[in-house]
Every structure is written in structure tokens, then in C-alpha cells.
Image: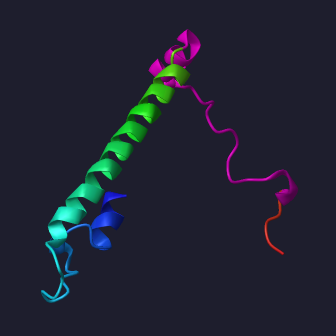
Amino acid sequence: MGFLRRLLGGSSEGGRDSGGSDAGPPDATASAAVVPADEDEIERERELLRAEAVRLDNDLIQRQLRYANRSWTPPAQGGSRRADNGDRTAD
């Protein structure tokens, strides 16, 4: 969101200067519009972190996450030779 705000002219530093014919400083309105949006974004991030903490608040899930890097996979069996190849020497 912050990237889009800066891109679309959240401040005069973004390159959206109109040449000085405006009837007021553009920074006053831009900073007032940015503050509530930043607060909304911060509140959304907090809500996501809370939801993630509630989702992971289970002993089984905590154990699975703790030992996830120690998972075992069986060794590969066989090789490049297949059953339908037979013992052909040359055709």
C-alpha cells in the first residue's frame, strides 16, 4: 500500500509536482491522508499476527514445526534399469 501511495503522489517527492499553480501546499493534504492509511495498515498487520499466533497455539503443531527439518525420507530404490528393458545386447 505504501508503495502505491508514493507512486500515485502521496507526497511531492514522488514527482507529481504540478508546477506551482496550486492554491495550497500539497504536503498538508498528503500527510493528512497518509496517516490514517498507515494506521490501518499497522492495525491489519497486528490482526494478521494475532491470527497467526492463535492458529499456531497448539502443542501438536508446535512439535511438528520444531522437528520439521528432521523429517526422514526413504532412500531411492532401484536404478536406471527398468523391467521392460530385458537383457537386450543390440538390436
State whether residue 39 is above or below residue 85: above
Quarter occupied by residue 39: top left
Q: Among all residues in the image, which is located at the extreme front?
A: 23
Q: Residue at x 79, y 66 (%)?
A: 89
In the picture, measured across the screen, residue 19 lies left or right of residue 35, that is left
Quarter occupied by residue 46: top left
Find residue 19 and report its horizontal and vertical position in percent: 14, 89
In the picture, measured across the screen, residue 59 lies left or right of residue 14, that is right
In the picture, measured across the screen, residue 76 lies left or right of residue 38, that is right
Q: Residue at x 46, y 23 (%)?
A: 53
The C terminus: image quadrant: bottom right
Q: Residue at x 51, y 15 (%)?
A: 57
Way the structure is coloured: rainbow
In the picture, measured across the screen, residue 32 lies left or right of residue 42, that is left
The N terminus: image quadrant: bottom left
The count of marks equals 0
Does the segment drawn in magenta span residue 74?
yes
Find residue 90 and report its horizontal and vertical position in percent: 80, 72
Q: Nearer the viewer, residue 23 or 70?
A: 23
Q: Nearer the viewer, residue 59 or 6?
A: 6
Q: Nearer the viewer, residue 80 or 30?
A: 30
Give the magenta range. Answer: 58-86
Q: Nearer the viewer, residue 27 or 45?
A: 27
Find residue 59 and report its horizontal and vertical position in percent: 54, 10
State whether residue 8 is above or below residue 29: below
Q: Residue at x 13, y 72 (%)?
A: 25
Find residue 3 and report its horizontal and vertical position in percent: 31, 63
Residue 26 seen in the current view = yes
Residue 69 seen in the current view = no
